[in-house]
Amino acid sequence: MSQRVVIDSLVFVREGGLLQGELPVAGLARALDMLADTAGELSYRVQGRMGPKTGQSSRPQLFLEVDGSLSVCCQRCLEGIDYPVRIRSLLELVKDGEELTQEEIEDDSKDFLSAQKELDVVELIEDEIILDLPVAPRHENCVLPDTGGLSKKAEKVEKVSPFSVLKDLKGKVR
């Protein structure tokens, strides 16, 4: 990783913290093998806030935004594809030992993150980027890589049965 930005997640939320900046794509060490090119930067913004009151308390939240473009590798032709990154994640901080209700777990509008004294923001951003990337990116219309000059006739080689040699032995009994 090219840089580290570490925060105490609960203090950051309590103080209404805001971090924003540019993150070089080349610094995303865990995502590099999924990319065709490491040029460029992604802009990010992390804001701490208290969530809406539910019952008697509200839960601390981090709102994460990441924007930019990545070049991912097409799984068919192995060329780069421009992939627009537009991440909007709401992460509710959960203290150690805090139980979540089934309703909270099933709520797809937010995710949960363990509250940490030393939360690496760049690592968190990289996690969200990896989760956002397509599993098997492909161009809509792309051609397979050159097969080394083989013609279509050469590709349609007749399949030979492994039992064809037995045909010659048929009738030749000792």
Image (cartoon, rainbow, N blue to C red):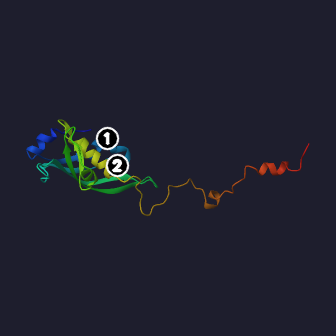
State the residue in front, 119 or 144: 119
Percent coordinates x, y for residue 126 in the rendering: 27, 45
For residue 146, the mark is none
The amino acid on which the numbered mark 2 sits, given as a three-letter code, is: Asp
Percent coordinates x, y for residue 105 in the rendering: 27, 50
Residue under numbered circle 2? 37
In which quadrant is the N terminus drawn? top left
Residue under numbered circle 1? 29
Percent coordinates x, y for residue 84 in the rendering: 29, 57
Q: Where 151 falls versus 8 (above or below)? A: below
State the image quarter where residue 10 is shown.
Answer: top left
The amino acid on which the numbered mark 1 sits, given as a three-letter code, is: Ala
| Number of other residues with Cα within 10 Å of mark 2, as a class: few under 14, some 14 to 19, many 20 or more | some
State the residue in front, 45 or 140: 45
Q: Residue at x 24, y 51 (%)?
A: 104
State the residue in front, 99 or 95: 99
In which quadrant is the C terminus drawn? top right
Give the foreground label among 1 and 2: 1
